Amino acid sequence: MIKFVNGKILVLSDVHYPYCDEKEVKKIVEKEKPQLLVLLGDIVVNEGGEYRNFLKELKAEEVVYIKGDEDVIEGDTEYLDVVNGNRKFVFFHGHQILSESTQYSLAKIMKKVNYYLPPLGFCTLARIFRSNFSDYFILGHSHALVNFRKLKCVNSGTLSLVRNLYNDRGYVKIVNGRVEIVRL
């Protein structure tokens, strides 16, 4: 099923609650005032703390929780198709493409050659994986924050405080079919 969204879409990925700055995450949502908030996987990775309250405080007209590989609670879906500004977007976390250990091993080697090679490879695999449609892919999982415009694919960064191979802190917003990366 395809959603049609006329307003702003805010994408937060790899928050890794409770290993995040909760106030920072809430401030981003309050500042951006999205019509649709897409929680793009690995949002709640530990049931400790007050995760239910944390999620309730992330206010938008509509919230869609896409399940990631480390989420300890159920998401709404694994994939989301949205039309915004006459452009189709496909959102998915990205862990479905290769196993975690394979991705990490390849990324570690490729990153030595070029910083952007692993997320570029990730986007290329996503294109192959879901080649039959979509103007733009929005992926999580890698913690990289980069927009490959010619490939029409975005890696949506992280808001986690946990160190990883990539720690590109930030998020993605989409307005009138245009993708914008916001670095923190």
Image (tube, grey):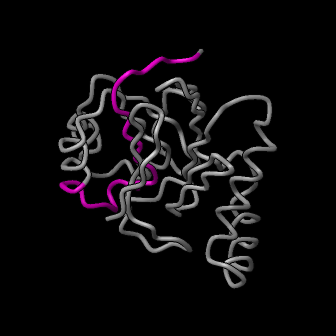
Q: Position of residue 17 (x, y in %)?
A: 35, 53
Is 50 located above or below residue 59 in the figure? below
Q: Report the side of 154 relative to 159 (left or right).
A: right
Report the quarter where the N terminus lies.
top right
* Residue closest to the eye, 128 or 48: 128
Asked whether residue 30 is drawn in magenta, I would say: no
Residue at 53% x, 25% y is 82
Asked whether residue 8 is drawn in magenta, I would say: yes
Residue at 50% x, 18% y is 3
Q: Position of residue 44 (x, y in %)?
A: 40, 47
* Residue closest to the eye, 136 or 161: 136
Is 38 located above or below residue 163 in the figure? above
> Which residue range is magenta in the image?
2-24
- Count how many numbered circles sit on residues in the image: 0
Q: Report the side of 79 relative to 106 (left or right).
A: left
Q: Position of residue 106 (x, y in %)?
A: 76, 71
Q: Position of residue 52 (x, y in %)?
A: 27, 37
Report the quarter where the C terminus lies.
bottom left
Q: Report the side of 165 relative to 122 (left or right).
A: left
Q: Report the side of 166 relative to 56 (left or right).
A: right
| Residue 91, picture quadrant | top right
Residue at 34% x, 62% y is 19
| Residue 80, picture quadrant | top right
